[in-house]
Amino acid sequence: MKRLGAVVVMGVAGVGKSAVGRALAEQLGWRFEDADDFHSPANRAKMAAGKPLDDDDRWPWLERLRQLLCDSMDSGQGLVLACSALKEAYRQRLGQGDPRLAFVYLRGSREVITERLRARQGHYMPASLLDSQFATLEPPRGALSVDVDAELSEVVAEAEAELERLDQERSATDESAPNPRRTP
């Protein structure tokens, strides 16, 4: 990819952010990180107790993630980050609008996602919090949208194709924009 340096794979809990993100990172030859690994112990305990996080819980976490994204993009090391990024304000905090960053919104039916959450073992996010995730979700504008009601390989292939298309669009826009350093 010429223009993109990082991708945030986003959506509600249980939609497949980590599985898709890992597979996408492997396809791209980029590093993968899961935003869940950057939560404070207090945030993890709160969610494990069945209590949804509020914005005060999320802001320091989002700042850590923004720094991770910036460091990766600035170093030229590609990064795929699995992160819920449920609100527009959270996506703005992560750097939405930076032409090096793209968001892939994984969407699926409540039934499919509930089934996946119930089947998941050893995760601190209980299925009982899914309603709070959907209540918080502000569907993103400008994100690539991929339906997860398919095999993992198909979801990843669609996401990769959409990212390639976006990267080509952004590269073409850059090449056609006037460059004050160019000599006529």
Image (cartoon, rainbow, N blue to C red):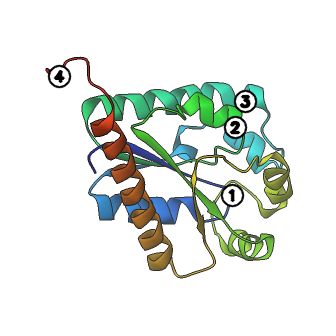
Amino acid carrying mark 3 in the image: Asp
Given the current orientation, which residue lies at the most extreme top position? 180
Instruction: Mark 3 or mark 1: name the one nearer the start of the chain.
Output: 1
Instruction: Mark 3 or mark 4: name the one nearer the start of the chain.
Output: 3
State if disc 4 and disc 3 touch (CB < 8 Å). Answer: no
> In the rendered image, which residue does mark 4 sit on?
182
Amino acid carrying mark 1 in the image: Ala
Instruction: Mark 2 or mark 3: name the one nearer the start of the chain.
Output: 3
> In the rendered image, which residue does mark 1 sit on?
13
> In the picture provided, is 79 more to the left or to the right than 154?
left
Image location of residue 104, percent across then percent down = 54, 55
Q: Residue at x 39, y 37 (%)?
A: 100
Image location of residue 41, percent across then percent down = 63, 36
Q: Secondary structure at mark 1?
A: loop
- Which is more toward the observer, 56 or 144? 144
Q: Secondary structure at mark 3?
A: helix
> In the picture provided, is 3 more to the left or to the right than 89?
left
> In the picture provided, is 21 more to the left or to the right than 42?
left
Q: Residues within 10 Å of mark 1 (few under 14, many from 20)?
A: many
